């Protein structure tokens, strides 16, 4: 609240005609309380008696009587020709008479800084904030009419076109822009699918270990998740035909298993698609960080192989730009579009429009691709740094393996360490040394079959990686 | 795609080692296709052979052979000392050889402009775009560290504080900032409640007629909605004790029934709270446009009367700023906070951060309150204008009643008109004359008990209101 402005609406609840106390006394009392609690500061101008009478639906006589009371008490003063003001020289002790406002918000936590080795967090300090802010200013200062029209709940058309183009070039997906649906992230995509192409109680096979938020989103929508242990190649497709009840869906990370990193081989991709074709199953392809590949060439997205409208592709910008942007997208087969459109028309989208035209421009003018290229070089160096720092400080404790892509490494516990601690207790101790290492066991829905630590390297300068590895070494030797 | 840049990643899927065609032929073919389809425009610089060899994991010999092929065909040219470029003088006819890219997006609808008498739409042309864009630029050009930290899924703390302050002053709710949860709108609030304090299958009483998106959001979460017909005073509290199965929740619009406009009297509010206290029921208070009141004083929010942690208050900024902002909020009783926090920590929020610090600043510096005051004056004039235009052009057809608050009026069909048409057919005909009038029958979950038209006045200049009323008169006389 700006203490030099005063809004008559602040007095909306000052007056109660059913009380014995005269209205002018109630009004003076409420004004006095606003001044004493600092809600209206010294020097603030009070509205004219005409305005107040109008807003509060009382006579001007009542207002003037209340004001005169305040003037006589020294809370307000009139300045010649310009109305009434809160006194500029209220004694300090007068201003500290208890708090009648809402309780203080001591219980609000401060945002937790991103610290080594938090995974999945891009280095937001390297984001082109200046360019982004300039685009925000340019686009929203005088917004084009389409931005002020009824927003398409499927997303801002130029962004959908830019995403389709991006997927076409980077992921080999020949989709049309109208198949792209802008969401607030993977969870909204799951909500939309659960409420259109799935039915409550449907079984969905998920990867074990896997992405917990995906599993929770499926479960919260009444779907039954059945974890399928992954092997060295990712999702085990033999699970498709085993089991008593047939599954209706499969949620996978074929480009790079999350969090272990295996790329699903072509043979298994074809088996997945074959299963879906035969059974009318739905494959949810979660492509969470395919932008960052350091070696070799990626396999095209699973969706690019799908001729039978079985695959839904789910992507996001949280790994490239920032997770707090809350812009993701899904690419749905033609057959699913009508249902999703109808649902979004009924309940609206949860994706905000504000960043969509900015991102569309950023993608169209090449800034987005340039940012990915730049980050890819930087993250590659950081992975190398983490490997070197692990060799120097964590030798004999952790076996940190290089990864061909992504933003984190998986560290296995050396036998001697595993004999002393499990990954969860390591994570708890590391937290005490201001380090975030996610235990691999926390990615399991059932009993953890493997122990390990997920160590993100993308978000941290090389010096921080070095220092973090050294601190982690101390923790593990204690 | 900026046609003067070229990204080697565009070639990521150009090469398939399992094909008989030599890699250099494949590469030349893919590059040719990118040029022919205009994805890479005349004059674009091609990456060096070293960069390409690196990105594509092939030898430089292969790259150079492909490039020489393109040069010999006239698609590329070398410029002394600065590398290879796409030829600047490709003949136009060469550039039009069919489309190998994704199909054109003819099926993408243009955003529908807001037209008379669409309800619930603020006049976004009067939004202080320049101030807003300046704040966006200021805040995001060099973001403070907390904005780059792990975002609190409950929302940006200063915004939560500003909302608590606003509710305290304007709605009489003495909540603490930590009770305020920023959402992407009422639907996310319902999702959060359905997944924490309700159980699948719980019965929730809703207003009939009422807000359809609210009902759909409840139903999509597996809750059973039971419509309760409203009377002249809004929600009928006698329904609380009737019925075989007890209800677990009630969703109401006590400040102003949506869409009919009744304010729930104090006696019924107390009955609602008494029912909730006795049965452990939950009252969802949807306060959708309480900012715009033109006469009299508002009753404090229902939540301000609640001493027993029964009421959840749901609000949004869509009526004040823009619905495409996707920022709303809920105020939850202390007892519900832990569950909601846990859920949000698991699945994340769908509310984007980008506008939150901007809105917090806008509220704190008084711009928000000033904007509401300004709009209230303008909307009051527009309501007066609609009433006058209805008297002039719709006399004998519609009975348009004034409203003490809000952004729309309810028009009843005169008997002679009702004998000829129902409200849905009127809405369909009006759409043909570029007018949006929502039929009252569409707000009913069951059989519509009343006919009428919802006529928004807030979003339109007075001349457009006059012209719209005149057109509607023509439509209704045909």
Image (cartoon, coloured by chain):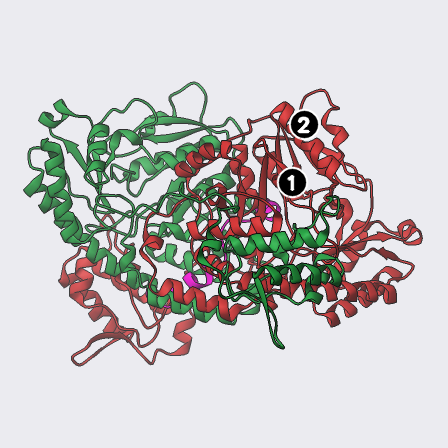
Chain colours: A green, B red
Q: Residue B163 carries which label?
A: none
Residue at figure coordinates x 25%, y 32% from the top left: A440
Task: Provide residue A17's location: percent of width, then percent of height.
Answer: 75, 47
Most extreme residue toward the right is: B416
Q: Is residue A416 magenta?
A: no
Which badge, 2 or 1, comes first in the chain's sequence? 2
Residue contact at pointers 2 and 1, CB within 8 angstroms: no
Q: Residue B302 carries which label?
A: 1
Q: Residue B275 carries which label?
A: 2
Count of numbered labels shown in the rendering: 2
Task: Provide residue B175's location: percent of width, then percent of height.
Answer: 53, 43
User: Relative to residue A376, is residue A215 drawn left or right?
Assistant: right
- Report the quarter where the C terminus of chain A lies: top left
**Eyeballing the image, is A238 above or below A371?**
above
Residue at figure coordinates x 69%, y 32% from the top left: B272
**Eyeballing the image, is B98 above or below A37?**
below
Tag 2 and tag 1 share a subunit? yes
Q: Few, some or many C-alpha atoms within 10 Å of disc 1 (few <14, some 14-19, many ≥20)?
A: many
Most extreme residue toward the top is: A244
Range of residues picked out in magenta: A342-367
């Amino acid at each position: 609240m700006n203490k030099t402005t005063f809004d008559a609406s602040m007095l909306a609840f000052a007056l109660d005609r059913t009380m014995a106390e005269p209205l002018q006394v109630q009004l003076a009392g409420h004004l006095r309380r606003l001044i004493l609690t600092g809600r209206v500061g010294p020097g603030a101008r009070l509205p004219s008696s005409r305005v107040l009478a109008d807003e509060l639906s009382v006579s001007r006589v009542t207002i003037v009587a209340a004001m005169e009371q305040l003037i006589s008490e020294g809370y307000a003063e009139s300045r010649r020709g310009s109305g009434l003001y809160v006194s500029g020289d209220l004694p300090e002790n007068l201003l500290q008479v208890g708090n009648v406002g809402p309780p203080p918000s001591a219980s609000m936590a401060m945002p937790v800084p991103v610290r080594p080795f938090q995974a999945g967090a891009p280095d937001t300090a390297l984001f082109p904030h200046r360019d982004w802010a300039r685009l925000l200013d340019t686009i929203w200062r005088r917004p084009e009419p389409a931005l002020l029209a009824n927003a398409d709940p499927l997303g801002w058309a130029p962004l959908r076109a830019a995403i389709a183009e991006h997927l076409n070039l980077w992921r080999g997906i020949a989709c049309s822009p109208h198949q792209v649906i802008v969401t607030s992230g993977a969870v909204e995509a799951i909500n939309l699918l659960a409420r259109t192409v799935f039915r409550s109680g449907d079984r969905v096979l998920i990867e074990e270990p896997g992405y917990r938020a995906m599993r929770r989103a499926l479960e919260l929508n009444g779907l039954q998740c059945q974890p399928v242990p992954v092997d060295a190649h990712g999702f085990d497709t033999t699970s498709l035909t085993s089991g008593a009840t047939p599954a209706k869906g499969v949620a996978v990370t074929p480009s790079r298993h999350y969090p272990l990193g295996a790329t699903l081989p072509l043979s298994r991709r074809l088996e997945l698609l074959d299963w879906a074709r035969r059974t009318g199953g739905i494959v949810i392809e979660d492509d969470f960080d395919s932008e960052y590949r350091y070696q070799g060439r990626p396999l095209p997205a699973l969706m690019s192989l799908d001729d039978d409208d079985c695959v839904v592709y789910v992507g996001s910008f949280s790994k490239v730009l920032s997770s707090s942007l809350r812009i993701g997208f899904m690419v749905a087969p033609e057959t699913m579009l009508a249902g999703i459109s109808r649902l979004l028309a009924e309940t609206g989208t949860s994706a905000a429009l504000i960043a969509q035209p900015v991102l569309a421009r950023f993608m169209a003018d090449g800034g987005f691709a340039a940012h990915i290229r730049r980050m890819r070089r930087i993250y590659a160096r950081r992975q190398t740094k983490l490997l070197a720092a692990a060799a120097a400080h964590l030798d004999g404790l952790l076996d940190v393996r290089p990864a061909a892509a992504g933003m984190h490494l998986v560290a296995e516990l050396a036998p001697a360490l595993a004999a002393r601690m499990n990954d969860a207790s390591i994570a708890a101790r590391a937290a005490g040394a201001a380090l975030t290492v996610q235990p691999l066991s926390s990615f399991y829905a059932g009993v953890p079959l493997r122990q390990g630590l997920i160590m993100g390297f993308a978000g941290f300068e090389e010096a921080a990686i070095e220092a973090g590895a050294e601190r982690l070494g101390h923790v593990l030797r204690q």
